[in-house]
Image (spheres, rainbow, N blue to C red):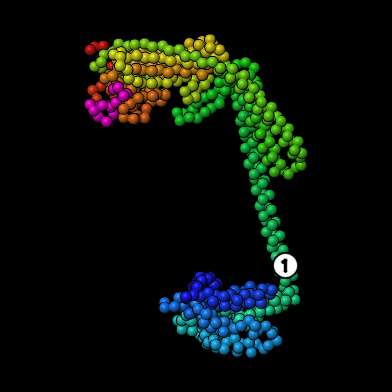
């Protein structure tokens, strides 16, 4: 019984007996030590190892899967013993005859890259058949006149024939025995040829010309690259200058020379008087610190961008460190001014107060309750100072009023009456001040027969200042009551508890019924909108429709 090892030789895995393994290992160690000190030694050893792997592969078959000692000895005899060619003065003929005594010189067709004009096909064929390469090339040229047959054959051979790259492949192409001596000679010859070609190239003066042309080429590319960078930096500077100037004029003009800033929203053009917006929060000296702070924190960086853009264009010299540190100091001053103003204003919001107002309403259980909104009349005001989403500030008779949108909530109740609960909230510097701010909230609503109408804004006088005033309207509807929510509530803040888990906006413009779990379409109401016993149509409910409905209900 023998011990079998698994080894990797030049990328190929072999199962080998232990005694054969040590025999082969000693052989390869001797070869490696012989060539380890020469510059081409690594390539020689790699080719020898590849050839040994090829020879061992020929010993493997379906019936024989393990390399034994006899196989290794045959390979060593084929390749040659290293001790037999240590004497460099022995003739090449003696080495070749000794090392190849047990080998057969098999030729294989390759493409020869060393003697090629196009792909090395003709040179490879000449080595394989032992014919002068000029004859092969002449035959290919003559065959071109026979319907291009030579070209087709040449292309096929170009694709089919491998390229002789390694010394072993080049020896196999020439029909020479692939022994250690021949591999070494082949590689040494390649090194000598390369060295001789380089020396001839150097002596001819072409090397100096190549260096000069290469330096010119690199210098030219560098000049083009530098020019491109310079142009790009100038263009960047122009863009920075134009952008900075536009932003500086826009900010300073908006803050100091124009009261109104135009805002575009999904509902159209909106106006914003920033001075009035600041005044309804705080009209003390804090607002001046706010303006100065905005200038220092917003305009100063734009000035630095403008300076940097001009420097990119005109490339003037400046003390960048002093300029940067000065700008940083002023920016920090502006930041502290804004922070101080914010801290001072925050004192107005320290305390919170809440006031609740509740009213119960009589209703007819058999009729549908219509919940709708009434627009605040802004036709007769003197001026609209602020008009952005959900916030309006107008002036009438020299008195400024702030309008804000309320929040609606519709929930079920076990009572037999409809109830409306107003929750007014506000903040202030003290509890008393917070209650005063909450009580200053004005809001109008009324119930006319089965129509419950609310203003679409609550208001307070601007002199009372904005202190986070909020109004929550809770509409409690008895179970079993039918409800129709007008489309006018579509853009309001609304929360509707419903059994179908619809989004709040999806219950708008539907007739629903109140259940214990919330509003429901109900089995008696189809899923499609407005198919019910009411006279409300899918189109928006207008004032004329409400008036007609009121007259109809009064007649009943």
Q: Please state, as top left, top right, bottom left or bottom right, where the C terminus lies in the image.
A: top left
**Residue lying at the far front of the rendered structure:** 1
Residue under the image location 66 percent in, 37 percent down: 305
Q: Which residue is mark 1?
A: 211
Residue 424 sits above or below residue 526 on the image: above
Residue under the image location 23 percent in, 23 percent down: 533
Residue under the image location 30 percent in, 22 percent down: 516
- Residues 292 and 520: in front is 520
Q: Which residues are magenta?
A: 515-530
Quick check: is 526 in the magenta stretch? yes
Quick check: is 524 in the magenta stretch? yes
Please tell me whether mark 1 sits on a helix, a strand or a loop. Answer: helix
Q: Is residue 337 visible?
A: yes
Return the x and y of residue 200 as percentages of the image width and height: 72, 77
Q: Is residue 162 visible?
A: no
Return the x and y of residue 530 as percentages of the image width and height: 27, 26
Residue 555 sits above or below residue 166 on the image: above
Residue 198 sits above or below residue 283 on the image: below
Residue under the image location 72 percent in, 63 percent down: 215
Return the x and y of residue 136 as percentages of the image width and height: 53, 85
Q: Quadrant of residue 165?
A: bottom right
Report the number of discs.
1
- Residues 487 and 115: in front is 115
Q: Overall secondary structure of the magenta stretch?
A: loop
Residue 100 sits above or below residue 292 on the image: below
Return the x and y of residue 315 as percentages of the image width and height: 73, 44
């Amino acid at each position: 019984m023998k011990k079998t090892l698994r080894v990797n030789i030049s990328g190929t895995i072999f199962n080998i007996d232990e005694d054969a393994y040590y025999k082969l290992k000693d052989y390869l160690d001797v070869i490696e030590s012989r060539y380890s000190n020469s510059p081409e030694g690594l390539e020689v050893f790699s080719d020898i190892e590849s050839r040994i792997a090829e020879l061992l592969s020929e010993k493997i078959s379906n019936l024989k899967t393990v390399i034994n000692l006899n196989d290794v000895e045959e390979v060593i005899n084929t390749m040659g013993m290293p001790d037999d060619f240590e004497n460099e003065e022995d003739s090449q003929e003696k080495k070749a005859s000794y090392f190849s005594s047990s080998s057969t010189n098999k030729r294989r067709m390759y493409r020869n890259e060393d003697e090629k004009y196009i792909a090395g096909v003709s040179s490879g064929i000449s080595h394989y058949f032992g014919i002068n390469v000029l004859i092969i090339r002449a035959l290919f040229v003559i065959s071109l006149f026979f319907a291009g047959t030579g070209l087709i054959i040449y292309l096929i051979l170009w694709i089919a024939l491998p390229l002789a790259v390694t010394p072993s492949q080049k020896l196999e192409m020439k029909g020479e025995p692939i022994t250690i001596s021949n591999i070494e000679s082949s590689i040494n010859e390649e090194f000598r040829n390369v060295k001789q070609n380089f020396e001839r190239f150097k002596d001819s003066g072409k090397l100096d010309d190549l260096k000069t042309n290469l330096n010119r080429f690199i210098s030219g590319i560098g000049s083009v690259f530098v020019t491109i960078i310079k142009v790009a930096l100038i263009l960047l500077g122009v863009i920075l200058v134009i952008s900075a100037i536009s932003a500086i004029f826009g900010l300073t003009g908006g803050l100091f020379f124009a009261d109104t800033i135009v805002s575009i929203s999904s509902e159209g053009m909106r106006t914003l008087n920033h001075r009035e917006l600041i005044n309804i929060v705080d009209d003390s000296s804090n607002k001046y610190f706010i303006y100065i702070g905005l200038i220092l924190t917003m305009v100063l960086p734009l000035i630095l961008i403008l300076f940097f853009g001009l420097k990119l264009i005109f490339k003037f010299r400046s003390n960048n460190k002093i300029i940067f540190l000065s700008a940083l100091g002023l920016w920090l001053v502006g930041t502290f001014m804004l922070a101080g103003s914010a801290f001072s204003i925050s004192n107005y919001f320290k305390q919170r107060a809440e006031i609740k107002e509740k009213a119960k309403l009589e209703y007819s259980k058999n009729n549908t309750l219509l919940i709708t909104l009434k627009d605040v009349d802004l036709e007769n005001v003197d001026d609209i100072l602020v008009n952005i989403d959900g916030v309006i500030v107008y002036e009438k008779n020299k008195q400024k009023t702030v309008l804000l949108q309320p929040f609606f909530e519709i929930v079920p109740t076990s009572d037999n009456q409809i109830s409306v609960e107003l929750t007014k909230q506000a903040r202030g510097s003290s509890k008393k001040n917070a209650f005063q701010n909450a009580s200053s909230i004005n809001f109008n609503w009324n119930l006319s027969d089965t129509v419950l109408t609310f203003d679409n804004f609550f208001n307070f006088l601007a002199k009372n200042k904005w202190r986070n005033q909020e109004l929550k309207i809770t509409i409690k509807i008895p179970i079993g009551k039918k409800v129709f929510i007008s489309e006018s509530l579509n853009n309001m803040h609304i929360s509707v508890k419903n059994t179908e888990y619809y989004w709040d906006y999806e219950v708008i413009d539907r007739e629903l019924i109140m259940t214990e779990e919330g509003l429901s379409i109900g089995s008696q109401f189809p899923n499609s909108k407005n198919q019910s016993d009411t006279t409300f149509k899918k189109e928006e409910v207008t004032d004329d429709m409400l008036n007609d409905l009121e007259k109809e209900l009064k007649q009943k």
